[in-house]
Amino acid sequence: MAGSKLVLEGRVSVKSFILGLSVVIIPLIRTCFGHIDWVFDYLTDIPGKIAICLHIAVINGLLLTIYRGALYKVAVRACFLGVIFGCGLMISLSDTTWTYFGWYMCSLSFFHYSEYLVTAIINPRTLSLDSFLLNHSMEYTLAAVSSWVEFTVEKLTVPELKQLRWLSVLGLVMVLCGEGLRKAAMLTAGSNFNHIVQNEKARSHVLVTDGVYSYFRHPSYVGWFYWSTGTQVLLCNPLCTLAYTIASWRFFRERIEEEELSLIHFFAEDYIEYKKKVPTGLPFISGIRVN
């Protein structure tokens, strides 16, 4: 793991995320003026929208004043994710039928922000704006938008489908467990972890087989798979649950085979022996075949 001192970009991201999260003070201020509950209708009505937009504009102006260039790009992304998390938190705590979408917003924003922060901690030399995974791929973006569209359409046409609390709680558990496993894998791997499959072995690259890696060969992929599917179970999106499961399974099958070719090249018999003892962790995926 990297040293105990967080790199500058990491510190900037933490401050900016918290600054974005401060959007939650809007309903608190509203409460001080005589409203004793978190008023979802107010936040989604014109006054609430104006208040949130003004809050974001002020924060962005502050970030522009404090940071320049690359640091501003880090700050504005972290702040954006903080705002999404804050808005998701407000929706989650409001008396509304959109509660589960609030859970989803918190899950999505925290996943992307924590990817950057954990990378800043364990492997700062590989840290970049891509570490947020916000521009993962066009397919990833289309999948996210599709899930929002399905949730909205089904909520308007089949509202009872979006009120299956037990199913949303199951999805939340999948999301939390998947997120926890992925971050545990990243922290265990330390500087060996990289968002990009490596084709050349670095001097510091070692084969990690302890911690969560003693249970799964690819715990970060297992975590991401169940987190991804869990977000759709949480939203009670039947179509996207099926689509996400199939698409994620195919993506990780190809990714694991590609990565294991490199790992066998890097570690030869050591990896082959490890491969025999420990499963990938993903259903019906055994990895690259070795004769």
Image (cartoon, helix red, strand yellow):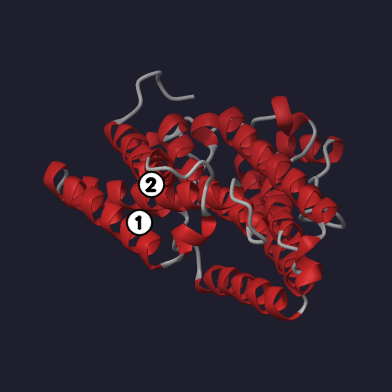
Provide the secondary structure element on which disc 1 rests: helix
Judged left or right of residue 46, residue 172 is right
Residue furthest to the left: 65
From mark 1 to mark 2, how far is it between C-alphas? 7 Å
Res 230 label: none
* Residue at the image point whose x is 85% and y is 39% from the top: 276
Measuring from the top left, give residue 163's x and y in whole percent.
78, 61
Identity of the residue drawn at 73% across and 40% down: 177
Which numbered tag is attached to residue 26?
Answer: 2
| Mark 1 closeness class: few <14, some 14–19, many ≥20 residues within 10 Å | many
Contact (Cβ within 8 Å) of mark 1 with mark 2: yes
Farthest residue, direction front: 34
Query: On the picture, is 288 further left or further right than 124?
Result: right
Residue, x 27% and y 32% (percent of image)? 8
19 or 197: nearer the eye?
Answer: 19
Label 2 SS: helix
- Amino acid type, residue under disc 2 in the picture: Ile
Q: From the viewer's perspective, is residue 117 above or below residue 42? A: above
Q: Position of residue 195 (x, y in %)?
A: 51, 49
Where residue 100 sits, quadrant-wise, is bottom right
Q: Foreground residue, 93 or 77?
A: 93
Amino acid type at circle 1 is Ile
Question: Does any portion of residue 199 appear in the rendered image?
Answer: no
Front-most of residues 71 and 109: 109
Q: Residue furthest top?
A: 4
Residue that carries the numbered disc 1 in the rendered image: 52
